[in-house]
Image (spheres, grey):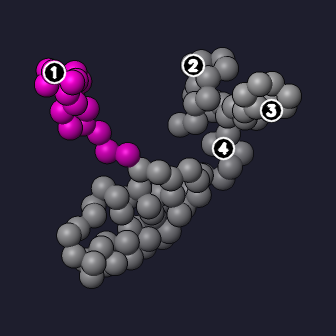
Amino acid sequence: QVLQDSTGRRVQKMTFVMSNYFSMGVESRIGRGFDRHRRQSQLLNKMTYGIEGVKKAWFKRTLTIDNIVDGLLESPGEPDERVVFRTKDSTLPDGPILK
């Protein structure tokens, strides 16, 4: 996507794929796999979703939540109340990173 200002000059070029999934279970892995292999046909999309479900549920091991999240920090009462997740692989001490 090319963005232009009011004079028509190029401002920035952005190209990315975004998946709006927040889950740590097998359903998120199925959804991500489906997004990567999405088709133009509704029937093919249903088949793709089924194939991804079989692959992720039967042939891939899904980690348990205690192997994904290392800690949980709640900050109630702050102006921007937030929850911060950290993983064992995180290099930032207080960043909202979940890998």
- Report the disc number at residue 74: 3
The residue type indicated by label 2 comes to Thr
Residue drawn at x 31%, y 45% is: 17
Disc 1/disc 3 C-alpha distance (Å): 46 Å
Of residues 76 and 36, the one drawn nearer to the viewer in this rendering: 76
Determine which residue is flagged by label 1: 7
- Report the disc number at residue 91: 2
Q: Is residue 5 visible from the viewing direction of this image?
A: yes
The residue type indicated by label 3 comes to Glu
Spot occupied by residue 38 in the image (x, y as percentages of width and height)? 28, 64
Disc 3/disc 2 C-alpha distance (Å): 19 Å
Spot occupied by residue 88 in the image (x, y as percentages of width and height)? 63, 30
Spot occupied by residue 37 in the image (x, y as percentages of width and height)? 27, 61
Mostly what secondary structure, the magenta segment? loop
**Mark 4 residue element:** helix
The residue type indicated by label 4 comes to Asn
Binning the other alpha carbons within 10 Å of mark 2 as few (below 14), some (14 to 19) or many (20 upward) gives: few
Spot occupied by residue 94 in the image (x, y as percentages of width and height)? 67, 20
**Which segment did they paint magenta?**
1-18
Determine which residue is flagged by label 4: 67
